[in-house]
Amino acid sequence: MRVLIGITTILAAFSNNASAFPPANNSILGKQNSSTFHRTIDSNQPAIPPNQQRKSITSIQPKMGNQALVYTTALATTFGVQTIGFLAAYALKTETFYDIFGGLNYLILAVISAVLGASGEGALAWIDDPRKILVTVLFAVSRGWLLLFLAWRAHERKGDSRFDEVLGKGGGTPQPMRFFVFWMVQAFWVMLVSMPMLFVNSSNVNLPTFSGYDFGWAILFAGGVLTEIIADIQKAVWVKRGRQGTFCQDGIWKYSRHPNYFGEIFQWWCLFAFSYSSSQNPLGGWADPLWWAGIVSPLFTMQILLTMQPTGICNAEGRNLKRYYDKCKERYVKYRENTSILIPFVGYSRVPQFLKRTLFFDFERYEYRPSSSNSAEDSSIAKKDE
C-alpha cells in the first residue's frame, strides 16, 4: 500500500507541476519545426489550407532517436547473457543459475535502455523524463523482486526437478541441446516481456505531464507488481510455517488460486497500455507498429504461464493436484468451486461455467484426472510447489 501511495504522490506531482520537467527545445518535432510554428502563429500570414496541413504533418519524419540501437543492443545482450548462463550451468551440471540469470538479464536491459535511450540526438535526458523514470523504476522493482525470490526459492529447494532429466541426474544421459533450448526460451521471454519498457525508454517524446490515461495505467501497473510481491511473500510464509491446511488460503490466496501469476500477467498488460503515449508516430500509438509489437509482452507471458509445461499453472494444476485430492478432497473441491483461478474476487461460485472456461481461463485441462499408471510420477512431481 505504501508503494501505491508513493507512486500516486509522484504522479500527482508530475501532473500538477509541469515546470518540474520543462519541454526540451529539441523535442520530437525538432527545433526548426518548433520555430516555424511560432513564426506562423506570431505573423499575419494566411492560414494554411487543411489539405496542405495534413500533408505537412504526415511528411514530418520524427527523430527516431536510438530506438534501433536500444532494441538491437537489448537483443544481443539477452541472448549473450543466456548463452553464458547455459555454458556455466552445463559445465557445473547445475540448474541453480537459470532463474537468477533471467532476473539479472531484466535488470541489465533496464539499465542499457535507460542509458542508450537518452544518448541520441534530440533525446531527453533520462533523469528529466518522468515517464522513463516511472517505467524503469517499477520495472526494476518487479524484476528485482523476481530475482531475489527465485534465488531464495532455488536455495530453499536445493535444485529444480524440471532439469533433472536434461542434466542426466539420477544416472540418465545428459541432453545438452535440450538444456540449451531451455535457456533460449528464457532469452525470448526476457526480450519479449521487456518490449514495452524498451519502447518507453527509447522514445524521444517529451510529455512533461501525465494525462488521466497515463495516471490510471501507471497506478494499475504498480498494483500488478505489488500483487505479485504480496502473493509470493504470503505463500513463502505459509510454506515456512509448515503448509498448514495442506493448500494455501492465506491473504490474497483466499480469493485467487494463483494470484502471483495474475500479478505477473496483469502488470505487463498495464505497461503495454501505458507505453501508448510514448509513441513517436504523429498519428498516435495506434498507427505505430513498434508500439503494437509490445503486445507480445503480456501475450507471451500468458502463453508461458497458462499453457506451457513444466511451469506456470500447467505445472501447478492438473495431475499435480493429486496431493490435495488424496489428503483433503472435499475441502479442496469446495475451494476450487469458490475461488477464481487468476483474478482475485469474491463470488466466483456464481460465475457460469462457460465463462469460467473462457474469460476466466479456468480451462478443463487444469482439472485433476486420476491415473493409476502414473501415480508414482504424480507423487514425485507434486512435491514441487509452484
Image (tube, rainbow, N blue to C red):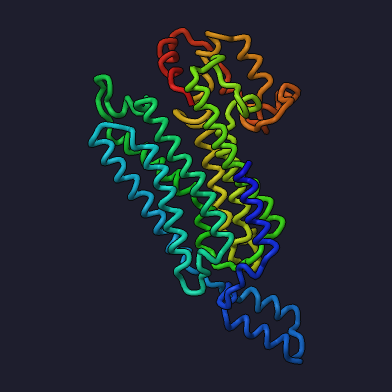
Q: Can you say which quadrant of the picture contains the N terminus?
A: top right
Q: Is residue 167 left or right of residue 111?
A: left
- Which is nearer the eye, 337 or 247? 247
Q: Is residue 101 left or right of residue 365?
A: left
Which residue in the rendered view is the most extreme toward the bottom? 44
Query: Quadrant location of residue 171?
Result: top left
Q: Note whether 102 is above or below 369 in the view shown.
A: below
Q: Is residue 130 left or right of residue 379?
A: right
Residue at image x 31%, y 42%?
Answer: 85
Residue at image x 27%, y 25%?
Answer: 168
Q: Note whether 93 is above or below 279 in the view shown.
A: above
Q: Note whether 239 is above or below 124 in the view shown.
A: above
Q: Note whether 32 is above or below 181 in the view shown.
A: below
Q: From the top left corner, tell me how far across and down residue 289 is, in percent.
A: 57, 59
- Which is nearer the eye, 292 or 95? 95
Residue at image x 42%, y 63%?
Answer: 69
Q: From the top left corner, tell me how far across and down residue 103 is, in percent.
A: 42, 43
